[in-house]
Amino acid sequence: MGNAGKIAFVYPGGYNSYVGAGRDLFQLFPGVYEEMRKHSSRLGGMIGEGLVYPRGLEKPTAKDQNLRERALLDSPITMFESGILLSIAYTKILRDCFHVEPQIALGYSMGEVSMLHALGVWQETDGMSEILRDSPVFRTRLAGPMEAVREAWGLSEAAGDERIWVCHALRTSASQAREALEGEDRAHLIFINSPKEVVVAGEDEACNRVIQRLGCEHFDVTIGDAIHCEIARSEYDELVRLHTLPVRAVSGIDFYSADRFAPIPIDTEVVANNIAKIYCHEIDFPRLVRQAYHDGARIFIELGPRENCTNWIGEILG
């Protein structure tokens, strides 16, 4: 198939990192460490070593492990940055050690950011990290106390650890989910993962009503920010600013977007606006994958923590 079809590199979203992810990467591929230092002058901080690789004098109990996982999940920026760093490392291993080159690249949600870093459109991560950590978007506006959500729903300021935003994966079709969401202004379809799986997010009570109407199998998913819906539109200008970085032209690879469902021009302004737009509407992953397949992709390789995209692609193209 590799002789006849194109290879697509696929990059997963922002909440896939976990405690211990890639822990022996640099032992297995020591040459990659020096290459990674070209991307960041502070690799330990970028990968969130204190949270992803926590140290201890005693073997952690199951409770300790749960607390460590919770601490990582409650740090969205660390989740984003560690996922991006691991995607960069896996891409370097595949290209430099195994000499596998993509002709198509695509990402799931924040995977589009990982894609641009990993394949050299954006060349260093420190600058983006500083802007990201300084901006309120993923600290207080769309994550943490979720000020943008509170403003949209007319809620008071955050008090304690109250949860106002939940996410559920539902084993149902997008059309059935849309029908069940009618009349619910505090529940949103944010992801179409596969023909038989979607993610609904918003107020707990509203999401539960949707689930009851559908009567489908469901489970909680860990997404700690309010994105891929109209609520994020209030942060559009800041999202553009966060992703306005110098770009480098890369030949031989078509970079697909979940906004256009087609390759995007590699231009600073176009790329920044494209990323901001995808944060403001639902992600239709099956449509993106099918378009890549239609355009010749026959081998899909996921580069990042976990294997969610791999499983969905198997279902989409089954």
Image (cartoon, grey):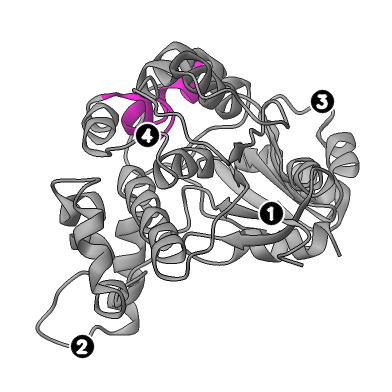
The amino acid beneath tag 2 is: Lys
Kindly identify the residue that appears in the image at 24 percent across and 68 percent down: 31
Q: Of marks 4 and 3, which one's residue comes earlier in the chain?
A: 4
Disc 3 residue type?
Gly
Local SS, label 2: loop
Residue identifier under label 3: 183
Looking at the image, tell me whether mark 3 or mark 2 is earlier in sequence order: 2
Amino acid type of the residue tagged 1 in the rendering: Ala
Q: Is residue 86 left or right of residue 16?
A: left
Left or right, residue 54 beside residue 225: left
Is residue 287 within the magenta segment?
no
State how far apart marks 3 and 1 are (Cα).
20 Å
Which residue is label 1 attached to? Answer: 169
Identified by mark 4, the residue type is Trp
Q: Nearer the viewer, mark 3 or mark 2?
A: 2
Q: Which residues are magenta?
A: 135-151
- What residue did someone put label 4 on? 122
Give how far across and how far down residue 105 sits, in percent: 59, 45
For residue 189, what is the image quadrant? top right
Tag 4 secondary structure = loop
